[in-house]
Image: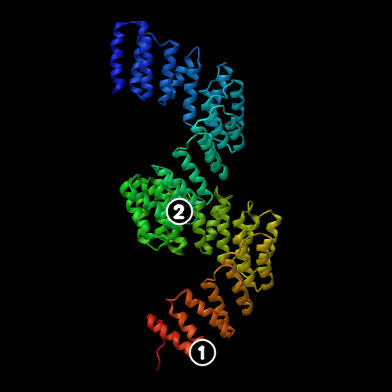
Amino acid sequence: MRVWSFYKKFSSVLATNVRSFLTFEISHLLQLCSIFKAIEQGKQTHQQIVVHGQSHNPFIITKLIQLYAECDNIKSARHLFVKLSQRNVFAWTAMLSYFSRNCLIEECLSTYKEMKLDGIILDGYVFPLVLKACAKFSSLAIGEQVHKDVVVCGAEWNLQVGHSLIDMYAKCGDIKSAKRVFDLMQEKDLLSWNLIISGYVSNELLDLAVDMLGLMSMKGCQPDIVTLNTVMDAYCRMGRCDEARKIFMLIKEPSIISWTTLISGYSRIGDQNNALDTFREMINRREVCPDLDCLSSVLASCQLIEDSRSAQEIHAHGIKVKSPFAFYRSSGPALLTLYAKCGRIQDARHVFELMDKTDVVAWNSMIHGFSELGMKDLALEYFKKMLPMGIKINETTLSSVLPVCDLKYGKQIHAYISRSSLWDVTPIWNALMYMYSKCGCIGNALSVFSHLAHKDIVSWNTIIGGLGMHGWGQDALHLLQKMSHYGIQPNALTFTSVLSACSHSGLVDEGLDIFHRMVEEFGLNPRTEHFTCVVDLLTRAGRLEDATNFIGKMCVKPNKHIWGSLLAAALAHQKVSIGVLASENLVELEPENPGHYITLSNLYTKAGRLSDALAVRKIMETRGLVKDSGCSWVEGN
């Protein structure tokens, strides 16, 4: 080892007892110990320093403080620092560096204040250490005070200080001040540009981040991979993944960060197929190995489209290139939830057995997966298993299990919540409202809602949906009106719940008025579920002609639920022509469903269109579509 060979040389120097040369050799040796984090050799050197009477030399003691602080032995560093009679800027900076590096903000700031009181002249090495701590803990007020000290000390033109100020202001959310520092810098390098672009992205000023890429090229500064990755992230956050792909193509050797940024960008906008294709492209190119973040991101895409086959491939690849413990800790929850969603219960259980059983995330994923599938017994089984293990239940646990609870068990959890530290967590109370509504206790749900201190949009949507579920349409409309008084802006889900409530309560005119207000007053574009609610509203009221006209004016293609609602109403009200229209569209949407053909054939027969009825039967025969025969368990005499 290089430092140890130097130590041997140092030992031979000690034997010569040449004092003037000794100080230089000690200094150089201690510096090497710091560089190589050679704490044991450093301690042996310290012993030699004491033996040879150098333990009172301020220069040597400062070097020892630097060594111990750099090797994270703060106890020894502090012991020497306290005994140092004349503390110079280097000793102070060593202590400050340790506190900043280890995110000990209080110690860092108190040390900085003591330096000022001790009359130490602050320099370009001190300010970045303090500003780093301010950035880490978003301490804007303290950061601004440090900035004043920077100006007083004349260090504002120091490039490293300027970088630290930009980073601090950006991470504290004051991007205007960050830009002001950037603009006033007399010298700017690549890091300067990267910091301000990153600051814009982290503060969601994405257009400005993109604009800076063009500006830096005009100023003669060429972007590097960090710049391009950051701009890619900006485009992805804006949903402009095609632009992000163009930036990606400019990178000669994309890093794993480049690939992961693009994959997660596609996933964020719902383009899961492109996310998976990008991952496969990365694997086929064999230039980088996917890390845990990349694997988790692409598994999330598989989960969203319930692509269990791709997930199995990624699963196999993950345990091959990463340690199983690390892989399952990072990607296990997404994998487990995916398998559960796809009904692959044994695979979900297998993944769960390989995950850390002390981690609440593993249990939450299992409970959530079964809850989503409607397998309430399995969800409750895992919830009950985790209780005696001493695992701390969190809001995700309760929010996942409450929707599948029956009334008795739900009330027990309600009592537990009231006694626990989670009593003020809004998502839990939202889940409790849903449980009571689902179990038929709308009064209990209303009581929870009225006592809820912090109501979010989900709270309002949940109770409105519950009221609609019980046919309390007027009360749902009243709550919609109250939302505006409380300054809560209704969203698309709110209007789905209100329209459903109107449908179940027979409030046809009120429902149509709400639909028009949603567009004209609240500026929301109707989605398929809104159109479905309006069609259901009209067909329940027997207004089939109005429903048919409404469908004809829709800006989206009607789905099977809309045509199915119209068909059911047409059959109930003996509206053959409307029934034929709905049935024809259902056959077009689901050509492999034999039931649609039989219904259409029967309707043609009722309408006197016998040739059309026979044609439909022939199509069924040609395609080999046979409706399962019914049977009876009642025996005849």
In the picture, measured across the screen, residue 432 lies left or right of residue 472, that is left
User: Where 626 sits versus 393, above or below?
Assistant: below
Residue located beneath label 1 in the image: 609
Disc 2 packing (10 Å; few <14; some 14–19; many ≥20): many
Residue 196 shows in the view: yes
Q: Residue at x 41, y 86 (%)?
A: 618
In the picture, measured across the screen, residue 606 lies left or right of residue 334, that is right
Front one among 19 and 54:
19
Image position, residue 101 (x, y; %): 47, 30
Label for residue 364?
2
Q: Kindly identify the amino acid type of the residue bearing the numbered disc 2.
A: Asn
Front one among 99 and 78:
99
Front one among 319 and 433:
319
Question: Which quadrant of the figure contains the C terminus?
Answer: bottom left
In the picture, measured across the screen, residue 429 lies left or right of residue 71, that is right
Image position, residue 391 (x, y; %): 44, 49
Helix, strand, or loop for circle 1? loop
